[in-house]
Amino acid sequence: MASNLFSVSTEGSLINSAAFWSISAILLALLAWNLFKVPSSLYRPSSVKPYRSTLPALGPIQLYSERNTFLRTVFGNPEEWNINPPKQNSVRVNARHHIMTITNNPLQDGKTFFNDRGLDFNTAYEVMFAGILELPSWLAKTPPAEDAGSERFVSNLRQSLSSARLQSNLPEMVKAAVDVFKAMPASNGEIDIHQTIYPLVFQISVLFVGMAEHARDINTVKAMEAPFWSFADNTGYMATHFPLLPVPSTVRKWIGAIKMSTAIRTTLETRKKEGRREKDYIQEMIDRGCSPKAIEDFIMGGLFAAIIKLKFSCD
C-alpha cells in the first residue's frame, strides 16, 4: 500500500495563484527590458554603424574589461591597416542606455562630433570611466556645488595644462624624472614600467592637476598613489554602471575614492588654516573662491584622465 506520507497537494499552492503569475510576468518583463531594450537612437540613420551586443541593453561588457581586444574586434589590428584597412572608422555602442560613439580616425573625429550635436564628450567620459563618483540625490549629504559640474571641470583642466603652467612646472618635472633615473640600476638591470614610469607620470600629473603638497617627494606621491590605483583599477563594468551594488571591485573603488577625498580635503583645509600659498593650479581655484567639492572633483577627475590615458597607451 502506497504511503501518502510524502504526498504533496497543490491545491491552493503558490503556483496556482493568479497573483504569483502576475508578479512573475511583471518581473520577467522588467528583466527582459533591462537586458534587451535599447534607446532608439542606437539604430538611428547615420554613417556610424551600431554595435549589436548579445544582450543589447547591457552593451559590450568587453569594452570595459578588455578594451583593447574589443576595439581590435571592431576595427581590426592597427598594425595591419596599411594592408587590411578597417571596414569602418566609427561605431556606435550602447552602455546601459547611454549611447557612445567611438572613432578610430583622428581626421574623422572632428566631422563626427561636429555633425552630431547629440554627442557630449564630458558625459561619455563619465559613463566610460566614472572618474568622479556621484551619489544619488537621496544619498548625498549636501547638494552638488554649482561650480562642480563637468563643464567647469573641463575649463579648469584646460587652464591647468596651459603652456604657461607647463613652463613653470618644467624644472620640477625634470627634477622628478632625474630622481627616478638616478634610482635605476646603472647596468644589467630590468625596468618594470608599473614600478617606475607610472609613479613618475603620477607625480608629474599631480604637479599640474593636484596639490603641491602631494608632489613634494616620492614618499608623498606614493601615499596619494596607492588609493588612486585602488580607485582607478576598479572602474570596470559593474563598478561603473552599478555603483551601489557592493561587489568586490565596487567596494575597492569606493575605499580608494574615500581615501583620496580625505587626503585632498585634509590638505586643503590645512593650507587654508595656515594661510599658506602654493604655486599650483589649486591655489588659483582657491583664490577664485571655488568650493572644496569643485577642487576635489577636479583633482580626482584630472588625475584619472591623465593616468588612465597613459595606462591604455602603455598596455
Image (cartoon, rainbow, N blue to C red):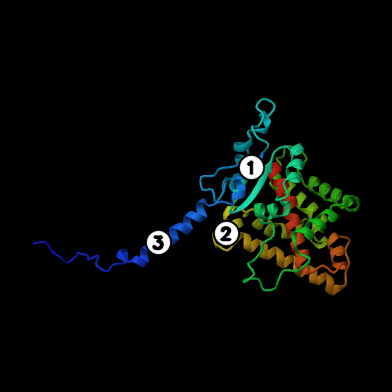
Q: Secondary structure at mark 1?
A: loop
Q: Looking at the image, is mark 1 or mark 2 earlier in the sequence? A: 1
- Kindly identify which residue carries mark 1: 45
Foreground disc of the pair 3, 2: 3
Q: Tell me which amino acid carries mark 3.
A: Ser
Quadrant hosting residue 82 = top right
Between the residue at mark 3 and the residue at mark 2, the CA separation in whole angstroms equals: 24 Å
Q: Position of residue 36 (x, y in %)?
A: 51, 51
Q: Position of residue 277 (x, y in %)?
A: 89, 67
Q: Position of residue 30 (x, y in %)?
A: 48, 59
* Residue 97 located left or right of residue 78: left
The disc placed on residue 199 is none
Q: Local crowd at mark 2 within 10 Å, few (<14), some, or many (≥20)?
A: few
Quadrant hosting residue 8 = bottom left
Residue 175, above or below 26: above
Q: Position of residue 14 (x, y in %)?
A: 32, 66
Q: In this figure, what is the number of numbered marks?
A: 3
Quadrant hosting residue 214 = bottom right
Q: Local crowd at mark 3 within 10 Å, few (<14), some, or many (≥20)?
A: few
- Kindly identify which residue carries mark 3: 24
Q: Looking at the image, is mark 3 or mark 2 earlier in the sequence? A: 3
Between the residue at mark 3 and the residue at mark 1, the CA separation in whole angstroms equals: 37 Å
The residue at the far front in this view is 45
Q: Looking at the image, is mark 3 or mark 1 earlier in the sequence? A: 3
Q: Quadrant of the N terminus?
A: bottom left
Q: Quadrant of the C terminus?
A: top right
Measuring 64% from the left and 57% from the top, which residue is drawn there? 230
Measuring 60% from the left and 51% from the top, which residue is drawn there? 95
Residue 89, above or below 291: above
Task: Say which of 148 and 112 sits in front.
Answer: 112
Residue 99, above or below 254: above
The residue at the far top in this view is 83
